[in-house]
Image (cartoon, rainbow, N blue to C red):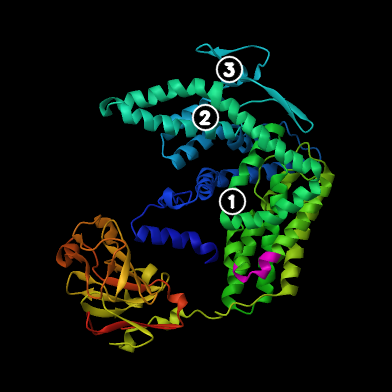
Amino acid sequence: MGNKVTKIHDAVVELLGGEVGESGDISHVSAEKQSIGNVIIQKLGEIFTPLVPAIAAAGLIKGLLAATAKIPGFDSTASTYVIMNTASNIIFYFMPIFLAFTTAKALKCSTIIAMMLGGFICHPTIDAIVQDVATKSNIFGLPVIKMAFTVGESSRVFAYTESVIPIILGVIVLSFLEKFLKKYVPEILQLILVPGISLIVMVPVMLVVVGPVGIYVGYIVQFLYTALYGFSSILGGIIVGGLWGICVIFGAHRALLPIGLNDVALTGTNTLMCFAGSANFAQAGAALGVMFKTKSANLKQVSASAALSAWLVGVTEPAVYGCNLRLKKPMICAVIAGAVGGAIMGIGHAVNTGFANNGILTIMSYWGEGTSFGQFVAYILGICVAFFGSAVLTYIVGFEDDPIATPVVQSAIATPTDNVTEVSGDTVLVSPVKGSAVALSQVDDKVFSTGMLGQGYGVIPTEGKIVAPADCQIQVIHNTNHAVGLLTDDGVELLIHVGIDTVKLNGTHFTRVSKDGTYVAKGTTLLTFDIDKIKAAGYDTTVVIIVTNSDDYSEIRTITTGQADSSKNAIAVVR
């Protein structure tokens, strides 16, 4: 799918009646079915992923400002420069507020109260109290914890502004506190008492317990990373530069973001994103190598688009999932080249003066104030070696080219002129609904008619009943009862969607007869619907039947005209 994946995802979610979340929310997956590690990675993804666009925007501005500041005679005290530099620092300075919002969403507690906590620890008065380590302060007789410490060669008094871990821990505590209060506070009083008591309790908890614990946790994390970097900056570059791409596969790279953000908060610079840049450019290079090597027009288009995304703005998921990981050898080449590039950066002690995504557009943010030209050169050499090395290595090593040189979807979507009234194949399914068959290309919805979701056909129903087209398991019936997903004994995955845009009816005129997860025999009624009332509401009643795993088969044959009912074979798959 390449860069089209977001559009396709949004279209499918809207089609099925869900809500498209900014963070790719996957919170509907039951926590009981996941390991603790997966839950932690999932939540970290939900917390940090929504911040990536803002961080990328800040990185772009920082890069442009850094480039401008290198112009001889440029006045960095000019008001425009100062204002734009402030704009680029907002996401970092007020990081606790942004993290409070995303963490509260991930943990499903009050976003407003969480943001108040974030704003509280960023407030100038509180910031001044916390940084005044010479004066003892207390709240309700409890001491406000303040501290100063040294990381590497930097010594500084800790401030909650720009911090990462304290507010995350604070919102975690807040989520438990809210659940406790809602359990015991009468519902009529919850509107006032729950947020009020939460804030009264959390303010001292933040300053006395959670905040200091977060500071120490951040310090320990930073100490371990600094220890690795101090032991061998080259080794640090090899590990991060080589394995960052692997982490992207599992989404685990989001779990590493606090290290870089914490590094910025403590020292004003970070090395993590430099090494990650080596990995990102290596993925771009591998995708470029695939583009030059492949003979598949489809793969050439996907890899070119993926390489551009990774090279330009550091978005590597299209490259990882679209070609490198799927073809295996390009992924290995990217890991090797990324490790070598990271090692070069480690040798030259490259740093980033903020926290910017890795791409050509943000390249100057790696030569900001306080960064030497030698460090910048080390970064440039690292990404060049990673990019070109990965591209050349991928081209030389090669890979098993995409066997799907031409899409099969177009040839398998029959047209009305085919006049197919019955089909045969390795596995055959009868029509789950009675009515007049039409070709998929005639369905008035591009998500279906273009074959985006798979191959199939449509039925203009004459009877408002959906039955099982074969012995199968009901994987899901949508909560508005307008769509059902099935898995047959032969492994055919089927989507039956009643009507166009009927999700907007919110279940009106639909009745569920069978239950999710049950095994049913061929001909069992799954759901019923009122054709006349749906038409009266202004909706197209065409039922669409799609084989969603069409790519698993060499051909999908469907009827395109004539009568469709449970006595006639309507879909046949050829293995």
Mark 1, secondary structure of its residue: helix
Query: What residue span does the magenta drawing correspond to?
Result: 326-332
Amino acid under disc 1 = Ala
Mark whose residue sits in front, 1 or 2: 1
Mark 2, secondary structure of its residue: helix
| Of callouts 3 and 2, the N-terminal one | 2
Label 2: how many residues lie within 10 Å, few (<14), some (14-19) or many (20+)?
many
| Of callouts 1 and 2, the N-terminal one | 2
Name the residue at 53% across, 33% down. Answer: 169
Label 1: how many residues lie within 10 Å, few (<14), some (14-19) or many (20+)?
some
Disc 3: which residue: 144
Disc 1: which residue: 252
Mostly what secondary structure, the magenta segment? helix
Marks 1 and 3 sit apart, C-alpha to C-alpha, by 35 Å
**Residue 331 part of the magenta-drawn span:** yes
Find residue 462 and report its horizontal and vertical position in percent.
17, 74
